[in-house]
């Protein structure tokens, strides 16, 4: 992802001097105008950039792209950016067709943008002053999916504030849900962050947004090409977000030769959980471990993260036997409704630092091994290999664990 320092030119009006003022007295400062809520818009787009970390260097590129795409903002849309990076105090900016990016508010003190109270306060303030009939939100930062933070491993769920090793602050997914559910339901939730398109995250957040867009794997270093998707963000168009994002990759003369993306229809997740429990959990009853042969890896770095596998390829491998064909067809119907759009590059590749040989080349290029059964959503499965890591135990605390029938298996 990308980092960037915004250069905002603030024009100060001249001070009117009182004719009979005592010249030894300092001039009174001009009054600060009280901001007034805008008239209700059709949609307010929020880009929440938790960038007080190693991604601070990427801010300039992304915000430059947003400014470049300003002409895509339609009448009746607000485009609001919250930015917290290493170089500046947290601030809220507004992007308009007429003025580009302008400063709307700078906070007096440093804040931890992955703190629930801070995030809720910022989003409530944006909701108050930029009301709309519809809302869409982009969450921009480091991320690694559902697994909760542990002091012994460097894991990040969503977001990272102050990248200083073990003391970095990160937001676990149930906490993120508790913030977002106090706001009007979003049309879409777009994660411009790695690993967030996993079924465990989507199910936890199913009631806070209609659609969820993101990647089950690492995203390219430059992240989303905002100059190509400002319009789609303003229109609440998940397909446009994905198509614009995917069109940027592969790029010539860069290592980022692809991006894996999908769109989840959150209203269909309960049906998918039921179908998954019906057809998947029998393979794991009594703590069986059928292995992971043929599963598509999105991560192999056990020192930092769980293994992450493609949900569709898991189900295909387990249900591909002839006697399971009807079960696979039934499950696939539920999956197609819940994940109506998934895309991968024509090379079937993406760049990853967390996938090692033989699953990736030495250059970090990873290839989807079974494009026909690529699903664009990752899923955790309990494994004996996780003994000692605590992930099997952590999994029990997810909403998906209960909804998809895992508690019946003994895992």
Image (cartoon, rainbow, N blue to C red):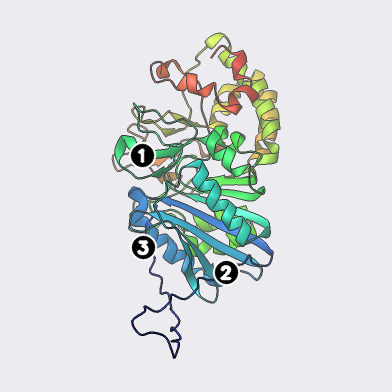
Q: Residue furthest top?
A: 286
**Residue 181 location, x and y as percent?**
63, 42
| Label 3 crowd (10 A; few <14 / some 14-19 / many >=20) | some
Q: Is residue 27 left or right of residue 210?
A: left
Question: Total marks drawn?
Answer: 3
Label 2: which secondary element: helix
Q: Secondary structure at mark 3?
A: loop
State the CA–CA distance, disc 3 to disc 2: 23 Å
Q: In the image, what residue occupies the spot 39% across and 33% down? A: 155
**Which mark is on residue 143?**
none
User: Residue 72 shows which numbered tag?
Assistant: 2
Q: Residue at x 37, y 41 (%)?
A: 352
Mark sitting earlier along the chain (2/1): 2
Q: Position of residue 377 (x, y in %)?
A: 54, 37
Which residue position is annotated with label 3? 5
Real-space CA distance between mark 3 and mark 1, rounded to the nearest whole angstrom: 21 Å
Question: In the displayed structure, would residue 304 be above or below residue 264?
Answer: above
Which is nearer the N-term, disc 3 or disc 2?
Answer: 3
Counting residues from the N terminus, which is met first, the one under dot 3 or under dot 1?
A: 3
Task: Tell whether 196 sits left or right of 353.
Answer: right
The location of residue 248, given as percent across then percent down, is: 46, 58
Residue at the spot of label 1: 168
Q: Is residue 291 visible?
A: yes
Comparing 131 with 228, the one in front is: 131
User: Toward which corner of the image does residue 269 lie, by quadrant?
Assistant: top right
């Amino acid at each position: 992802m990308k980092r960037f320092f915004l250069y905002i030119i603030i024009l100060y009006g001249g001070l009117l001097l009182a004719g009979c003022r005592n010249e030894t007295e300092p001039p009174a400062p001009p009054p600060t105008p009280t901001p007034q809520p805008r008239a209700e818009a059709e949609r307010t787009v929020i880009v929440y950039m938790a960038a007080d970390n190693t991604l601070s260097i990427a801010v300039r590129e992304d915000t430059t792209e947003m400014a470049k795409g300003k002409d895509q903002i339609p009448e009746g849309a607000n485009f609001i950016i919250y930015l917290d990076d290493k170089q500046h105090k947290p601030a809220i900016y507004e992007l308009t067709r007429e003025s580009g990016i302008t400063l709307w508010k700078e906070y007096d003190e440093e804040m931890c943008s992955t703190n629930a109270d801070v995030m809720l306060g910022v989003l409530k303030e944006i909701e108050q002053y930029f009301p709309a009939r519809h809302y869409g939100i982009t969450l921009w930062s480091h991320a690694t999916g559902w697994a909760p933070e542990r002091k012994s491993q460097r894991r990040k769920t969503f977001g990272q504030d102050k990248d200083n090793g073990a003391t970095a602050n990160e937001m676990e997914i149930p906490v993120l849900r508790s913030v977002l559910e106090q706001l009007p339901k979003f049309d879409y939730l777009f994660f411009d962050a790695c690993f967030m398109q996993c079924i465990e995250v989507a199910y936890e957040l199913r009631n806070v947004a209609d659609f969820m867009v993101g990647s089950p794997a690492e995203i390219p270093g430059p992240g989303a090409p905002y100059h190509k998707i400002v319009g789609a963000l303003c229109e609440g168009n998940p397909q446009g977000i994905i198509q614009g994002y995917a069109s940027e990759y592969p790029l010539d003369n860069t290592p980022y030769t692809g991006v894996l993306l999908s769109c989840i229809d959150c209203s269909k997740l309960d049906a998918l959980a039921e179908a998954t429990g019906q057809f998947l959990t029998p393979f794991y009853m009594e703590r069986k471990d059928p292995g992971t042969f043929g599963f598509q890896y999105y991560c192999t770095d056990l020192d930092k993260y769980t293994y992450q596998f493609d949900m569709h390829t898991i189900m295909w491998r387990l249900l591909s036997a002839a006697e399971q064909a009807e079960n696979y067809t039934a499950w696939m119907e539920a999956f197609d409704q819940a994940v109506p759009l998934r895309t991968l590059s024509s090379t079937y590749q993406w760049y990853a630092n967390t996938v090692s040989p033989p699953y990736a080349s030495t250059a970090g290029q990873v290839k989807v091994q079974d494009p026909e059964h690529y699903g664009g959503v990752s899923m955790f499965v309990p494994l004996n290999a996780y003994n000692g890591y605590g992930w099997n135990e952590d999994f029990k605390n997810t909403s998906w664990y209960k909804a998809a029938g895992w508690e019946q298996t003994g895992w």
